[in-house]
Image: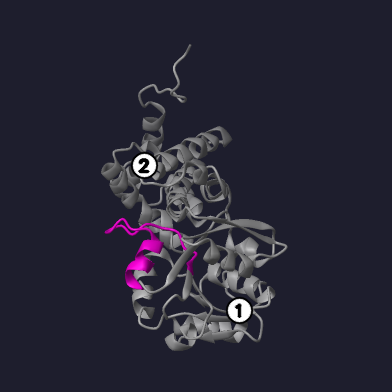
């Protein structure tokens, strides 16, 4: 049995808490929000995961020391925009070599750092890992079969976390390509916004298939330019995560995109979804990275134009369709 703390009381952290508890581990759930901890401790259920019950022997706290000290693993489950502030809050409490696995997805807009890079900057003494893949909280909380990947700098750390999470309904692979995993997880949210916008405009399966296929091409183009492995973008944290996020109504990014396609502004869509829409935060960062590494991201570019420049969604789709003629495979004809 391991002692595990979930840092963040949102739906994804709660789903993982349920999984880890069923695996026989001692689970503590921390949140900076007093109301959230009160809800969890009194109802033993998160309002966003109705019917997913939290065990009576879980610990719920807002106390920083209680959350961190003596724990075998810290699960960083706050939204990406709060990763730095939360890491800074806990920095002096984390012991040398203490393991932290980040489970959020995003890129910091101002620094263009991935979330694991933020953790390493704020908590340099920690052993930082990443858990990512096609995994909606609503399904993991209900125990539906899910497959995911743990990335870490050392194989020993990856295998340790793999063993904690692995179960008959939660299959865990390991990978050394932390950068590729994180880029896939962050950038797929931007493409999912595009897929949702297409749905909101009333387009069909042909359109979505095109966005998914060309979307993973863009993600891999930027990711490999930055040093990620091409195989990663063909795997669970690349095309796998992209498919589930573009296709499911569990996806907050797709839901926000649908509303934008129906005429909502970006701000109105985020208010309606009532959850953090990570793709909005990653979209600008993606374009800055594209400029830095000299790669073209036409889908992500159009998403930025719709989100931040007032471009109409239908015009953005037409501009994508009418781009200059391209070759899909670059090999020469014989």
Percent position of residue 245, x then y = 53, 50
* Label total for image: 2
Can you tell which quarter of the image residue 164 is in?
bottom right
Q: Residue at x 53, y 61 (%)?
A: 155
Rate crowding at label 2 as few (under 14), some (14 to 19) or many (20 or more) other CA atoms within 10 Å.
Answer: some
Say which label, 2 or 1, has the lower sequence index: 1
Per the rendering, the mark at residue 272 is none
Q: Is residue 323 magenta?
A: no
Q: Residue furthest top?
A: 334
Q: Nearer the viewer, residue 167 or 201?
A: 167
Q: Where residue 326 sits in the image (x, y, percent)? A: 40, 23
Does residue 115 lie above or below 55 as drawn?
Answer: above
Q: Which mark is residue 2?
A: 1
Q: Secondary structure at mark 1?
A: loop
> Which residue corresponds to the image point at 44% horizontal and 17% vertical from the top-left?
332
Q: CA distance from mark 2 to mark 1?
A: 38 Å
Q: Which residues are magenta?
A: 101-123
The residue wearing badge 2 is 225
Viewer-side residue, 224 vs 237: 224
Task: Please give the name of the residue rendered at 30% of the width and 49% of the height, measured from the top-left corner.
Answer: 308
The answer to which of 268 and 236 lies nearer the viewer is: 236
């Amino acid at each position: 049995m391991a002692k595990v703390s979930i840092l963040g009381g949102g739906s994804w952290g709660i789903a993982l808490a349920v999984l880890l508890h069923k695996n026989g581990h001692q689970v503590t759930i921390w949140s900076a929000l007093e109301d959230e901890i009160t809800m969890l401790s009194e109802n033993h259920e998160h309002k966003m995961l109705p019917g997913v019950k939290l065990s009576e022997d879980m610990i719920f706290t807002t106390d920083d020391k209680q959350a961190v000290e003596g724990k075998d693993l810290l699960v960083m489950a706050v939204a990406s925009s709060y990763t730095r502030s939360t890491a800074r809050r806990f920095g002096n409490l984390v012991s040398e070599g203490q393991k932290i696995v980040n489970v959020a997805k995003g890129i910091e807009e101002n620094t263009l750092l991935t979330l694991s890079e933020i953790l390493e900057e704020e908590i340099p003494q920690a052993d930082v890992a990443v858990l990512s893949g096609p995994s909606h909280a609503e399904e993991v909380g209900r125990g539906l079969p899910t497959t995911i990947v743990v990335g870490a700098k050392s194989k020993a750390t990856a295998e340790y976390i793999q063993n904690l999470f692995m179960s008959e309904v939660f299959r865990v692979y390991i990978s050394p390509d932390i950068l590729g995993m994180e880029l896939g997880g962050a950038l797929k949210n931007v493409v999912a916004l595009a897929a949702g916008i297409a749905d909101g405009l009333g387009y069909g399966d042909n359109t979505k298939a095109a966005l998914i296929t060309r979307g993973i091409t863009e993600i891999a183009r930027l990711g490999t330019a930055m040093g990620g492995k091409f195989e990663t973008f063909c795997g669970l944290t690349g095309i796998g995560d992209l498919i589930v996020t573009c296709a499911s109504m569990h996806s907050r990014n797709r839901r926000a995109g649908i509303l934008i396609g129906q005429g909502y502004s970006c701000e109105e869509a985020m208010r309606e979804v009532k959850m953090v829409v990570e793709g909005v935060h990653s979209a600008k960062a993606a374009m800055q990275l594209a400029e830095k590494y000299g790669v073209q991201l036409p889908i992500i570019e159009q998403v930025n134009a719709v989100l931040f420049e007032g471009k109409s969604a239908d015009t953005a789709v037409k501009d994508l369709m009418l781009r200059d003629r391209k070759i899909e495979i670059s090999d020469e004809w014989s």
